[in-house]
Image (tube, rainbow, N blue to C red):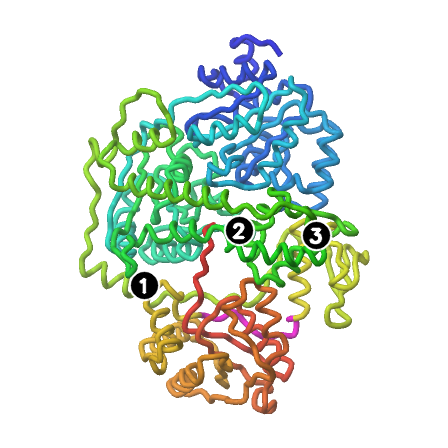
Amino acid sequence: MKLTKNEAEKKLYETFRIEHFYDEQWDAVKRILDGERVLMIQKTGFGKSLCYQFPATLFDGITVVFSPLIALMRDQVRKLNELGISARYINSEQSHEENTMNIQDAIDGKIKILYIAPERQENQQWIEATRKMKLSMVVVDEAHTISVWGHDFRPAFRRIINLVKLLPSHLPVLATTATATERVQNDIERQIGGNITTVRGSLNRPNFKLYVIKVKSEDEKMIWLAQNLNDIEGTGLIYTGTRVNTEIYAKWLRYCDIDAVDYNAGLDAETRKQIEEDLMTNSHKCFVSTNALGMGIDKADIRFIIHTQMPASPIHYYQEIGRAGRDGKPTIILLFYNETMNDGGIEEDFTLPKSFIENGRPDTIFYHKVVEYLKEEPLSEHQLMKSCNLKQTQFRAIKADLIDQGIIKEVLYNRSKKYEYQYNAKPLDTNSFENLRDAKMRDLWAMRSYVYTNKPRMQFLCEFLDDKSEVKYKNCDNSNLDPLTIDVNDYWKDKISEFRETYFPVLNVIETTSKKMKDDVKWSVNVPAYNQIDIYKNDILFKSYINCINWNDFSVEEQNHIRLMIESHRNKKSHIINGVAASYYGVSNVGNAIHRSKYENGGDFPDFLLKLTLKAFRKTFKNQKFDLILYVPPTSSGDLVKNFAIKMASVLKIDIGHNLIKNRTTEEQKIFQNAYSKRDNVADAFDYGLVSEIRGKKILLIDDIFDSGATVKEIGKMLTSYGAELIAPITIAKTVGGELA
């Protein structure tokens, strides 16, 4: 398609209300209109999306955009539709019916731009649909995720290349990213193939004011934020290293009268969507998040980005800070770094990203376990997770690697997805794992070098990303800005101590389901016997028997909904309510104290744990009357929980029962890696020796550590079946978990 720049800009204004292209934008747009394949490496906030959205409106056909971020899809589609451009997305947040409708509209030519998650390519419906669509362009957004050397690698992205290879040579392909080193660039170019042109611009963000504050504790980070955050102009993001820390930091800031909300991938879809909308409207001062928020948000006026935990690479750091200051106005970029040495002689804030890199892939023994099981027979994801004692994230990493190496493949058995061993497959090659781990460790050390560099900090980042443009760098605490400091005085020490003694994690044992699913579809279940189920959708019988459910008939959201219904039905007679823990395990000295008592012959749990647990009880259940205290029978800890419960009962002046028993041996829950195995370990494992003691009673159920909640849920069902009116769990600690997003 031949257009002059003036002609193109007239159409640009008519459609997007934008008067001009940047020179670099026009260069890319012109190449795309000419049918070229382009890799665009430009700084965050450059306007890369316009480089494919504009040509898409001119082409006779549909543009498919592969995007790794649901939030980005949602944001882009909303903006395009507001401009009168027909755009849709396909992802797991939508119902099967919605996705099917959007695919059909794409086939029928009713959509100009279709956003899709790369994992969708594994769906047979999508594979068949692409053969019927009139494709005009394929876009790979955040293209560094194609490359293992981009370190955000998602295996499904590699399958995009299979589609690209089938495209006619004249069909344009655009890959966009802000963070491609030369190694990543070469990998992307090799995979996309053809006569690809790379357009690389300067990555400098001159409006950024970059700081690093070296601290001696997590408390110092929290104190600085409380002292200074309200003095920073506008709305911003605070990134933490784990999901739990999003909750802790947000609650601390609210405790200090700073309007903060926490966000992570563990929240339900409706909540995440609402928080994303709140960010766009500046509804809160700050949004405390893992890297799950911000990466897909196109918002011009984010005024600050603060990291409480060092990212694993300058690649990640540049991406995350790049969400801010897109309007060109001054923007604060701050990284905290705890340089205190731990017992292993490693700086505290180096430890977390290092552990995630070292444990990023499961031990090779689990790869061999999966292969050995599949040599026997094809198995599903669920079956393999249980058989091999794997978390879902672990299994999916193993699955992706084994598929990529041609050792296993996905197969359909009556439309149910299973995995099958490929006979005569080559042995597992672990060299690539080791090479990638070494590369990630080099990047982590580079990120630490950023903390201690004497160079202008933006210069350091640009050089790492192989940006060779000649620009002058300034605006950091190494050049023309005064360093930031922390005033740690007695007032703030006391305030944060008070906070930690009043902050008690919730024990979520009541299952909830998606509001959208409830509103859109009438679902019901009938469970005539254990492991049997009839599923009704809009009064139509879908499937019977749990083991015979054809999960491919349902979207991911529907699958989750059905599983929740099954679990809810099994628990429907349970009178258990959400409880409370005195602390997170590992966030304070609580975990160490429990460990000493359980595993180091440290005697009964110390009195400070009793005092803290009583505080949690009084704050959470101050208006609730209890008739009886029970305690979870031990697996290996002897009388520790029993003795602790006796002390609780004595202080609270509540009767204690000693008749909750195990009717079979169970393993410690901590040895199991997934919820299925934890639930099976305790299923029907408990009984009560004196039923008359609990009938009609409100019970406080005490344990030392809450992990998945499988144990207390199982006890709750059993106690309910014997007539208990209410069961409230309370524990000394709740496990933190290690979720990054």
Q: Quadrant of residue 480?
A: top left
Q: Earlier in the sequence, mark 1 or mark 3?
A: 3
Residue type at numbered disc 3: Lys
Q: Residues within 10 Å of mark 1 (few under 14, many from 20)?
A: some
Visible residue check, residue 93:
no
Q: CA distance from mark 2 to mark 1?
A: 26 Å
| Residue 418 numbered tag | 3
Q: As displayed, is residue 571 above or below residue 627?
A: above
Residue topped by disc 2:
271
**Residue 259: x, y in percent?**
37, 50
Residue at horizontal 56 percent and vertical 74 percent from the top: 576
* Proximity of marks 2 and 3: CB atoms separated by less than 8 Å: no
Region in magenta = 571-580
In this picture, residue 562 sits left or right of residue 626: right
Marks counted in the figure total 3
- Magenta stretch, main secondary structure, is loop
Residue topped by disc 1:
499
Residue type at numbered disc 2: Thr
